Image (tube, rainbow, N blue to C red):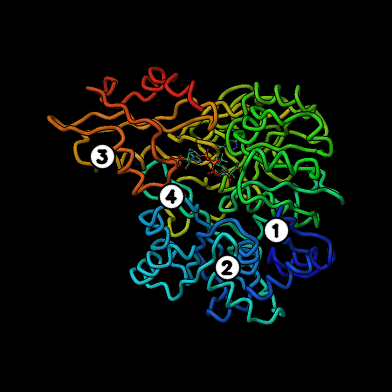
Amino acid sequence: MSSDGNLYTLLEKRFLEAGDSPAFTVPGRVGLSYAGLLDKVGRYANALRELDIRPGDRVTVQVEKSLANVALYLAVMKVGAVYQPLNTAYTTAEVDYFVGDAEPRLIVADPVRRAAMDELADKHGVPAVETLDAQGEGTLAELAAGMPVAAETTPRAGDDLAGLLYTSGTTGRSKGAMLTHRNLSSNALTLKDLWAFAPGDVLLHALPIFHVHGLYVALNTAFLNRSEIIWLARFDADQVIAQLPRATVMMGVPTFYTRLLAHSGFNHDVCRNMRLFISGSAPLLAETHRQFAAVTGHEILERYGMTECGMITSNPYHGERVPGTVGFALPEVKVRIADAQGRPVAPGEVGMLETDGPNRFKGYWRMPEKTAEEIRPDGFFITGDLATMDEQGRVTIVGRGKDLIISGGFNVYPKEVETELDQLTGIEESAVIGVPHPDFGEAVVAVVTLKPNASVDEPTVIGQLAQRLAKFKVPKRVLMVNELPRNTMGKVQKAELRKQYGDLLKIET
Ligand code: MCA
Ligand code: AMP
């Protein structure tokens, strides 16, 4: 067995075995076989080398979901570099920070953003900017098209970086989670077996590929299985329902499942070929789980994970999937529910979920203090999620110890939105909370007080924020109040605000 720890080496073996069988089927467009994928990755790897991308270099990618983007992801690993995906909704102001922090050698972005990215590249000394659009066309695609397919894979140690994925912090700056080849390959190998992937499985892929869920969990697992992937640019209930009869597995965030249930065309027959529906990234309501089972006969398998660790726990494939729980620690992954000192609490008691294993990230990029705060000396990572574990080891997430909103599977840190709000003319102070939302699970709402004599209206505030923040972070409502509720220490009582405004978005969809 080769000692090369590069995940691409492992995947390439599977691609070679899969040969001409379909890798991607794209409704209404030309798909790609595994042999075709191998060629494409080879060309992109040569293009990256042409651009002088060397092992360890970061490649920042803010590109729509496309097969070219998949080839780029794989090619970056093949040449030993580090893939740094960014949400396509991020504004230039947001990307500015990530580029400054990651110091990539190459930025790949949509052609419409070329000028803005050139400016950022100038500002941060990034040597190259290339483009790729939603159809997979652009300057990088042109460069790759002229390259040979044969390309060596740069050997990597398991501990070398494969990805740099940013997660916002509860205070201050976003942190880049350094994910190694071992982190990714161990998780993918485990999930393939745990979720019983087998020949003939077809994955329906409707997630974005700038997060761990759609990128690593979905793609790497399917690749290891040499599965056909039905490739949708985004989640669209009509399209998903049209493709489901050909699929056997789907992964999604809870919003996918509530949207399917709300669709008149969704029924038992549509799911006739399906073997497994998986949910994660946000809590799946037990009610949704039950309704889904009643309509389709399928018990959604809920699992729990994080950018820093990939998948951590999962309900069993064989065995009881209990609604409202996230199942058991993955094989080789250690989970403990602990007190503030990291000591395990008794079964059934609420504590902080801490975890360690081959999936646990190496640390935060250039933030040794943050890393030391969040990874204990014994290796356990403090997730910020509050949970219980029963005698059998089954985990239930009961809340968050971190001030975080998860909206439709995207994380929003109130602090970041408050910081932007507080800079707007007329705003005295702000508190950002998550309130229940029928479609997104939680939605962002801001409660603000105004400076004396200021005249500021809600649409203006929302419009101004949208210039700075990705759409999903922009509050769905901004409420003006005379004062914010505070405790005796003067701290804003967000629990009180959540109680007060809990029904605000209930009837909207
Ligand atoms: C879009 N909007 C949103 C969201 N998405 N607002 C709040 N929360 C969101 N998630 C905005 C749009 O910009 C639009 O604004 C308006 O809301 C309505 O958009 P809509 O067309 O309904 O949205 P969509 O394009 O259909 O997207 C909804 C979605 C999408 C399909 C649920 O957000 C999605 O794919 N989410 C998946 C996220 C994910 O993969 N998370 C994994 C990360 P306007 O009308 O004003 O223009 S977590 C992870 O990776 C860990 C490891 C884990 O455990 O999995
Ligand atoms: P991210 O940083 O985007 O990877 O988001 C990770 C966070 O999503 C976790 O810390 C949890 O708070 C949340 N999460 C992921 N899966 C689940 C789940 N099944 N149930 C509840 N929360 C989840």
Whichever of labels 1 and 2 marks the residue nearer the N terminus, that label is: 1
Q: Is residue 330 left or right of residue 119?
A: right
Q: Which mark is residue 29?
A: 1
Q: Please state which amino acid type lies under the numbered disc 4.
A: Lys
- Secondary structure beneath dot 4 equals helix
Q: Residue at x 44, y 60 (%)?
A: 366
Q: Which residue is drawn at 65% across and 41% down?
A: 312
Q: Residue 422 carries which label?
A: 3
- Secondary structure beneath dot 3 equals helix
The image quarter in which residue 77 lies: bottom right
Relative to 107, say whether 172 is above or below: above
**Crowd around label 3: few <14 · some 14–19 · many ≥20 (10 Å):** some
Q: Which residue is drawn at 54% across and 30% down?
A: 439
Nearest to viewer (mark 4 / mark 3): 3
- Secondary structure beneath dot 1 equals loop
Label 3 to label 1: alpha-carbon separation: 46 Å
Nearest to viewer (mark 3 / mark 1): 1
Q: Please state which amino acid type lies under the numbered disc 2.
A: Glu
Label 4 to label 3: alpha-carbon separation: 25 Å
Nearest to viewer (mark 1 / mark 4): 1
Residue 13 percent location from the top left of the image: 79, 66
Whichever of labels 4 and 2 marks the residue nearer the N terminus, that label is: 2
Q: For the residues labelled 4 and 3, say whether their Cβ atoms are less than 8 Å apart.
A: no
Nearest to viewer (mark 1 / mark 2): 1
Q: Name the residue under label 4.
A: 370
Q: Which mark is residue 137?
A: 2
